[in-house]
């Protein structure tokens, strides 16, 4: 499927002789149904879904694909169960109709088929590898490797046209994870958002992430605040501040998870029980 534009993430379709695999389902039931209908214009084969990670814009459309099997990292399922209701309320409150109503109506469906490091799916004449290469954009990022087509779906580990996003990230781990992504990238790399890229792009973004991690470690060791140190990072201010905050949290209390009530308070989600 064509690359997403703006806030819309990319979705993918991988077709074998006996089955097909949908990569990510976007952010609402209608958006998920739109993808499902597009798939049926291509193939009537039985389908399976994989979520590249547990962020709302990549998996809140899961319900539209039931009763299909939905794959994801084990911590993707945990993230959706733990944070999904808070994030649903937060984003529903920050969008305009009709998207706000569609988000509020989402029934969160975590992956039911989970794994820790790797899973192999046989689509009939085509083998697809689901790999967790390490923490990065989240702690549950999965890349979808299609070796016979030299295509790698990287999720939000790779961003095109937009800086890396650090809201749930592990900035100190992300560079080594990107090294692993680059090692797998023999051809096209489909990022979470934006146009298809290649290994050189992945390496360049990995270098930016490595410089970010190095600057964050140095700033933390020197006792500098986010206000003082953000300008040392090779990122726009908002992204640099977020990266420093997450890096400092990693260094203090890794893993930096907030209980749902704390997350709701931090995001300003009112009346969340």
Image (cartoon, helix red, strand yellow):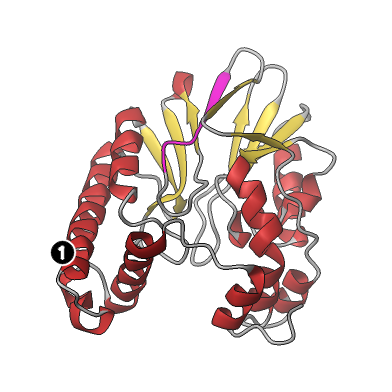
Give percent across and percent down for residue 228.
19, 82
Give percent across and percent down for residue 99.
70, 74
Magenta span: chief secondary structure: strand
Number of other residues with Cα within 10 Å of mark 1, as a class: few under 14, some 14 to 19, many 20 or more: few
The residue nearer to you, when weighing 188 against 77, is 77
| Residue 126 drawn above or below residue 107 | above
Whether residue 178 sits left or right of residue 65 in the image: it is: left
| Residue 127 drawn above or below residue 231 | above
Q: Residue furthest top?
A: 125
Q: Quadrant of residue 182?
A: top left
Q: Residue furthest front?
A: 253
Residues rendered magenta in the picture: 127-134
Whether residue 134 sits left or right of residue 124 in the image: it is: left
Whether residue 254 sits left or right of residue 227 in the image: it is: right
Q: Quadrant of residue 253?
A: bottom left
Give percent across and percent down for residue 256.
47, 62
Q: Give the residue displayed 27% in from the left and 74% down from the top.
A: 236
SS label for mark 1: helix
Q: Quadrant of the C terminus?
A: bottom right
Q: Give the residue displayed 30% in from the left and 30% down from the top.
A: 183
Q: Residue furthest right?
A: 67
Residue 197 in the magenta stretch? The answer is: no
Q: Is residue 179 visible?
A: yes
Q: Give the residue displayed 57% in from the left and 18% down from the top.
A: 127
Whether residue 256 sits left or right of residue 101 in the image: it is: left
Residue bearing the label numbered 1: 218
Q: Give the residue displayed 68% in from the left and 29% down from the top.
A: 20
């Amino acid at each position: 499927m064509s690359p997403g534009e703006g806030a819309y993430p990319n979705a993918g379709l991988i077709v074998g002789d006996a089955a097909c695999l949908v990569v990510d389902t976007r952010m609402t039931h209608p958006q998920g149904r739109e993808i499902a209908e597009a798939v049926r214009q291509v193939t009537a084969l039985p389908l399976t879904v994989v979520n590249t990670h547990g962020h709302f814009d990549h998996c809140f459309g899961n319900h539209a694909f039931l009763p299909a099997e939905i794959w994801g990292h084990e911590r993707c399922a945990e993230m959706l169960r733990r944070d999904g209701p808070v994030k649903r309320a937060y984003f529903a409150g920050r969008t305009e109709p009709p998207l706000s109503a569609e988000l509020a109506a989402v029934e969160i469906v975590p992956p039911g088929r989970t794994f820790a490091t790797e899973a192999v799916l046989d689509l009939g004449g085509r083998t697809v590898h689901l790999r967790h290469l390490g923490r990065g954009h989240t702690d549950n990022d999965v890349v979808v490797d299609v070796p016979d087509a030299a295509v790698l779906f990287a999720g939000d580990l790779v961003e095109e046209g937009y800086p890396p996003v650090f809201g749930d990230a592990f900035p100190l781990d992300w560079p080594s994870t990107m090294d692993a992504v680059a090692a797998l990238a023999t051809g096209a790399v489909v990022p979470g958002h934006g146009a298809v890229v290649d290994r050189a792009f992945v390496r360049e973004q990995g270098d930016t992430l490595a410089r970010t991690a190095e600057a964050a470690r140095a700033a933390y060791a020197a006792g500098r605040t986010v206000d003082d140190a953000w300008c040392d990072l090779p990122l726009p201010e908002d992204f640099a501040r977020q990266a420093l905050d997450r890096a400092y949290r990693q260094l203090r209390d890794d893993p930096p998870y907030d209980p749902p009530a704390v997350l709701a308070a931090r995001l300003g989600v009112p009346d969340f029980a």
